[in-house]
Image: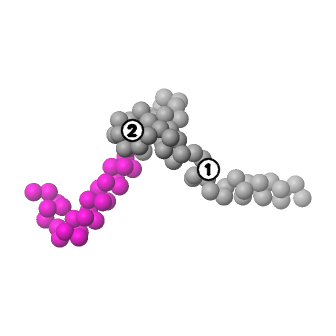
Amino acid sequence: MGVADRLHPRDAWIFNAALEQMREAALVYDACRRANEKNMTRADALAADPQVSARMDRATIDRLTSPGNYLGLAPDMVDRVLAASKR
């Protein structure tokens, strides 16, 4: 009997969701580590992982790993700092 089997159904759902998030985070972490070790992009490392490629296509992987999706306003902030430093 697993831990989730001994929990209230609501708590079991939360527990299983947390486990799934941990598994997904581990997949991304491992892909990032492989990308660094093998001098490849994160997108290539993720696409090469069968557990990832079974869940999403390459276009989705490329979209999710595009810097525009995780840098946010950082480029604008850098531009403002550089402009201010020239004054």
Please report the residue visible at 42 percent of the width from the left and 32 percent of the height from the top: 48
Give the mark nearest the N terminus, 1 or 2.
2
Q: From the viewer's perspective, tell me whether residue 24 is left or right of residue 64.
A: left
Q: Secondary structure at mark 1?
A: helix
Residue 54: x %, y % from top left: 35, 39
Outermost residue on the right side: it is 87
**Residue topped by disc 2:** 53
Q: CA distance from mark 1 to mark 2?
A: 22 Å
Q: Nearer the viewer, residue 67 or 82?
A: 67
Please report the residue visible at 38 percent of the width from the left and 35 percent of the height from the top: 49
Looking at the rendered structure, the kind of residue marked 1 is Gly
Residue 70: x %, y % from top left: 57, 52
Residue 15: x %, y % from top left: 26, 62
Q: Are marks 1 and 2 in contact (CB under 8 Å)?
A: no
Please report the residue visible at 14 percent of the width from the left and 62 percent of the height from the top: 5
Neighbours of disc 2 within 10 Å: few (<14), some (14-19), many (20+):
some
